[in-house]
Image (spheres, helix red, strand yellow):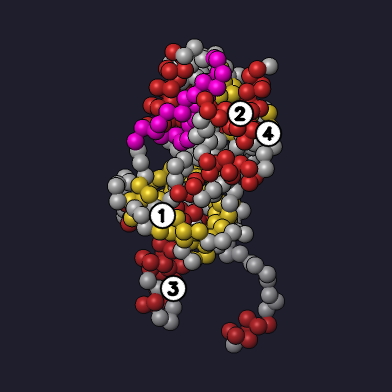
Amino acid sequence: MLLWLALALPARAEEPVTAPTGATGALRQFTGIIDALQQHYIDPKQIHLNERATIAFRELVRSLDPEADLLTPAEYAAANALPDEQTGDVGLALAARGGLIVVIAARDGSPAQAAGLFAGDELVALDGNSTSQMRVVAVRRALRGPVFSPVRLQFRNTQEIVLPRVAITTNLPSSTLKFLRPGIAYCRVAQFTEPARERLELDLAAAVQGKARHLILDLRSNAGGSFDTALRMARLFLSHGSPIVALGYAQPEQLSGFNTDTPPKFVPPLTVLVNGGTAGEAEILAAALRDNQRARLVGSRTFGYGWHNGMFPLPDGSALLIPTARYLTPTKRTFHDIGLTPDVVVDIARETERDLGRAGFGSFEWGNDGAAALQADRALARALELIAH
């Protein structure tokens, strides 16, 4: 009788279950479904409530955003573990875009950089397994492993490459400060870590000592890093009270702004080099310097990673990883999925810029081969032209 009635009734395409109102209503509905299943399902032993509830909640979180996830206690512990001498990676910063896992940038000095991996390269397989159904959090985790252990990576339209994992160093990076011409200094910042900030502060002091009247700050293929470090780096250049960035939350009244509270360490004007691998906190610094009329951006459009992520531990040892706010420039603009358009756009062929990245931005020997460096690096050459005029 019930089967006949079901067949006789007209079908309704995608008729939704009545939507609950508010969180309490959703929990009440979830509890009601579980109670009904336990009471009436033909084999209630198959329900496995704890496991299935976790799966359901994880799928809910993951459906919100490619970067959102519900981490198990073991995954959360691994995410919080500090790198040791036995743990390494290949040096790739990754993001999820349009259902794909793409490269943001390769870390300076890493196997990924030596292989010429560049912003926008699409990762399609890892150790022979397709990444089409993998979360970017899981891919990042899989890229870590014992130092010197190999990992096989397949990118779209390329042959498979095998890269060794290397130790994740936290040592103070080497100086990249160079005087390209009298009074014109160059400095590379490859990532936003405290050692990198300390190195930059030392280099700025040396630039001041060398009577620099202009600085070229190279943020190309800098995938960002620490938000707090970005604030500290901005304070090295901006006058007291200048806006750096704001965090725009879901509720407009929660908007939180960050300003400088110290005098700058370097006051001459700047030119900032950017490209498609400039992302996250590097975009914060670039936008803050431009919006405060401290710098001109030269190069190509940045990556556009402008979300602030938060990790929230839960009572059972798991953790919720979700974007919590948008980065807003001092002019209150978002750059997520958009990027920053440079003041002066320099068109460079992708393979040419890949070669520059493979060699290492800022690795040129200026004293011996300055002319060759400018011929290879059109963005740097254009920056020098603009300064001269």
- CB atoms of marks 4 and 2 within 8 Å: no
Q: Does residue 314 lie above or below 291 as drawn?
A: below
Q: Hey, what amino acid is under mark 3?
A: Leu
Callout 3 touching callout 1 (CB < 8 Å): no
**Where is residue 74, by image quadrant?**
bottom left
Tell me the CA gap for discs 3 and 4: 62 Å
Seen from the viewer's position, the closer of residues 319 and 273 is: 273
- Under circle 4, the secondary element is loop
Whole-percent x, y for residue 203 in the image? 43, 22
Q: Secondary structure at mark 2?
A: helix
The residue located at (47%, 42%) in the rendering is 107
Q: Residue at x 29, y 47 (%)?
A: 85
Q: Are marks 3 and 4 in contact (CB under 8 Å)?
A: no
Secondary structure, mark 3, is helix
Q: CA distance from mark 2 to mark 1?
A: 34 Å
Q: Give the extent of the magenta segment.
A: 171-194
- Which of the two residues, 223 or 242, is positioned nearer the viewer here? 223
Q: Earlier in the sequence, mark 3 or mark 4?
A: 3
Residue 244, can we see it? no
Q: Earlier in the sequence, mark 3 or mark 1?
A: 3
Q: Residues within 10 Å of mark 3 (few under 14, many from 20)?
A: some
Q: CA separation, marks 3 and 1?
A: 50 Å
Q: Which residue is mark 3?
A: 37
Sequence-first tag of 4 and 2:
4
Provide the residue designation for mark 2.
371
| Disc 3/disc 2 C-alpha distance (Å) | 75 Å
The residue that label 4 is drawn on is 346
Density class for disc 2 (Cα within 10 Å; few <14, some 14-19, many ≥20) is: few
Q: Looking at the image, is mark 3 or mark 1 nearer the viewer?
A: 1
Residue at 53 percent of width and 44 percent of height: 358
Amino acid type at mark 1 = Pro
Label of residue 164 in the image: 1
